[in-house]
Image (spheres, rainbow, N blue to C red):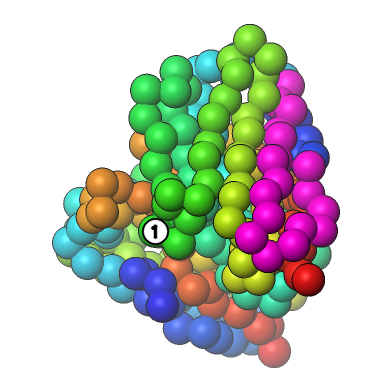
Amino acid sequence: QSLLSQPPSASGTPGQRVTISCSGSSSNIGSNVVNWYQQLPGAAPRLLIYGNDQRPSGVPDRFSGSKSGTSASLAISGLQSEDEADYYCAAWDDSLNGRGVFGGGTKLTVL
Amino acid sequence: VHLVESGGGLARPGGSLRLSCAASGFIFSNNAMMWVRQAPGKGLEWVAGVSGKSVTTDYAASVKGRFIISRDNSKNTLYLQMTSLTAADTALYYCARSPFSGRTVTIDNWGQGTLVTVSS
């Protein structure tokens, strides 16, 4: 069981806005930044959001991140078929001398 | 940036393997590096991380005491020594680079992975 909780699935229609949540605790999201990764089928993950709400160059501004307290969210606006993928949140956790943690992942389906 | 993993394969329960990751295209010692694994059909799991100058090493609870992460900055290579392997260690192991030098889960470059299978 991951320290970061994500819904196992989410869905939306093209053009719609969807959000994916990531719930943690004071030892991870509450005190460290959150990153989001996209993993297309058969591919290595790709960094979507870092530092809670920063987009690396090349990531469309349709993707946005936010954090409040011990929770974070990834929003995807103007949903496109190519957004169908697995999405993971990740954060540093200060317990047990420190370690990285990923959420369990959310499978996004574009209907 | 180019990360190429090697060393994966079949190992027996209780056995050992050493993974390597050859890095190129950046100043290796400036960046923290880590290993992330993904069991077949499962999600991502952070395994271990090492800071740029090897000042800090960190491990997931599931591998602590069995795996050792290290790096040789003169060879631009990251390693993962894995011992006391169990079936639960079966996964695709990714070498990953952070844009930062310290303790972090921010990863801006990933290798293609090397598959480790633990089976008798």
Q: Nearer the viewer, residue B6 or A85?
A: B6
- Residue B15 on the magenta segment: yes
Q: Nearer the viewer, residue A8 or A98?
A: A98
Callout 1 secondary element: loop
Relative to residue B120, is residue A98 drawn left or right?
left
Residue A50 can be seen, yes or no: no
Q: Position of residue B87 (x, y in %)?
A: 66, 71
Q: Chain of mark 1?
A: B
Residue at 36%, 69% (x, y): give it.
A4
Inspect the image, locate mark 1, and give the three-letter code of the amino acid beneath it. Ala
Q: Tell me how many marks there are.
A: 1
Relative to residue A97, is residue A13 drawn left or right?
right
Q: Position of residue B38 (x, y in %)?
A: 64, 63
**Among all residues in the image, which is located at the extreme top?**
B74
> Badge 1, how many Cα within 10 Å: few under 14, some, many 20+?
some
State the quadrant of the N terminus of chain B: top right
Residue at 39%, 58% (x, y): give it.
B61
Which stretch is magenta?
Answer: B7-24
Residue at 66%, 83% (x, y): give it.
A109
Q: Position of residue B21 (x, y in %)?
A: 71, 33
